[in-house]
Amino acid sequence: MRRRQFLGSATAAGGLYATSHYLPLISSANAAIPGTVTWGGAYLLDETTTDMPHTKAALAMNASSSPTGQSVNKALLDAIRDADWTKAGIDLRAGMDKQETRYGMVFGLSRESVLQSGYRPSEDATAFNLRLTGYNIVYDILDRRIIATFAVRGRYFTALAGKAGGAALPELYFDLLANKQNTGSIARFMTDLALDYEYDIKYRGKNFRYIDTVTTEFGQVAADLIGLDPVQYGEELALVATTAFSEKLKVPVIPYQKTTAVNRRMLREMTIVASSGNSPLNTALPLGEAQIGIRVFNHGWEFKEDDVKLQQRSKAKERALLKNEFIDATKAENNLVEFYQVNVTLGSRIEIQIFEIESGRPILTQQFFGQWAFLEYADPEFQMDRRSRIYLLHETLLDRAFDAILNEDMRGQLYDGLSIQQKADEYYLEALSEDWDVLSGECAEVASLLPRAFGA
């Protein structure tokens, strides 16, 4: 269904579905940070948190307890040594036992999310879908300031044979942190994707920060229907938006923190825990002031279920598909199992606002619609949690929406309506703007304000 057809049917449905060019290419970074940058390791931004038990357990593993015989930080150190950081315009060194340097780089971990940890009887396997959010931080210890924070999201999807319980999660988070062969890992980011970012001691442009998530009345009703706390989910959406913005545009961003009396200091400072020469560093350095704010309005969601259908599939074949592996056709006829599945369609609408913090002047105000059609088990015991489904749809939608700010091709696909087929699942994503020139003009203004290295 193309853009105008879909908009017509969506608007007719009411509630959730109602709606309220040119960009210059930006070159890769050429400027180097003067002098050596010391790698200080990965750590929890909040050591007292109880919300990251599996990441904390992974970081505590040592040579005798980890699955690889290395700690997370030893694995990251070895991976960084093998990477060519001169491509990024900086001289990043690891394991400098005696030399003190002015500049440092660390990785602060802020949140883990177990989106799926469920047994699938048709495959006799447990599927895991994990996220790990953090910030790649560059700092100047002499001037006592944070130079840049790049929001990063580790992603991991895997399946383990049989009924694997929560005891498997620490090792999976270890892999998500330390295995550079895992394309979604933090180690892979530090040896591949991070090399394409722009590094410098100062940036032109404005500082961006996510301000808050606003849940509309319809969003509150939708949350109540599935027993979801909209405030807590708003915090998750804030981190998804922050990382999507930083990753897709490859720009630094001021880290998101909810404003409370307890953590008000954290809005202006970031804890740095690093190993630098003979002097371990454990301090708090000030963050820059944000001039541009980002806000997401959550207009809610709706699940629609079709008739339950009996399925008959090969357990061996399904397990291979789950793990993206090939299996011989003759083996696929063995171990046939029967189970019931239901077709589900999830639809959601969000609005992204980007604005000047001091004056409130709007820069970009655009709504986006996302739909996800998928099959799931009819038995609730084996279903993915509804919150996780919503999270994954919003993540997909925000990734494409922020990518469209600089990527005109993606913007055009969203404007026309973008369909994405992933195995048995189908996504439909759309920018709900009625005017291409307005959409492109707003994207161009945001692009002109993005923080960029002076040498770029």
Image (cartoon, grey):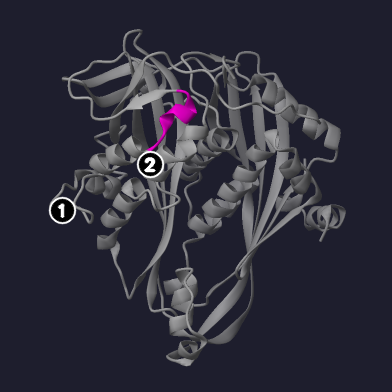
Q: Amino acid at mark 2?
A: Arg
293 and 75: which is toward the camera: 75
Cα distance between the residues tagged 2 and 1: 23 Å
Residue that appears at 72% across and 44% down = 410
Left or right of 13 on screen, residue 142: left
Residue that appears at 24% across and 35% down = 48
Residue that appears at 48% across and 41% down = 231
- Of badges 2 and 1, nearer the viewer stands 1
**Element class at badge 1:** loop
Residue extending farthest left: 64
| Region of the chain picked out in magenta, as a range | 83-89
Quadrant assignment for the N terminus: bottom right
**Element class at badge 2:** strand
Q: Quadrant of residue 52?
A: top left
Q: Is residue 255 visible?
A: no
Q: Is residue 367 visible?
A: yes
In primary-sequence order, the first of circles 2 and 1 is 1
Left or right of 251 on screen, residue 412: right
Location of mark 1 (residue): 65
Q: Amino acid at mark 1?
A: Ser
278 and 267: which is toward the camera: 278
Give neighbour class at mark 1: few <14, some 14-19, many 20+ (Cα, 10 Å).
Answer: few
Q: Residue 359 location, x and y as percent?
A: 65, 14
Question: In the rendering, which numbered label is found on residue 89?
Answer: none
65 and 219: which is toward the camera: 65
Q: Residue 296 location, x and y as percent?
A: 60, 36
* Vertical arrangement, residue 427 with respect to residue 33, above or below: below
Location of mark 2 (residue): 111
Whether residues under marks 2 and 1 lie with C-beta atoms below 8 angstroms apart, the answer is no
Q: Residue 66 location, x and y as percent?
A: 20, 53
Q: Is residue 313 magenta?
A: no
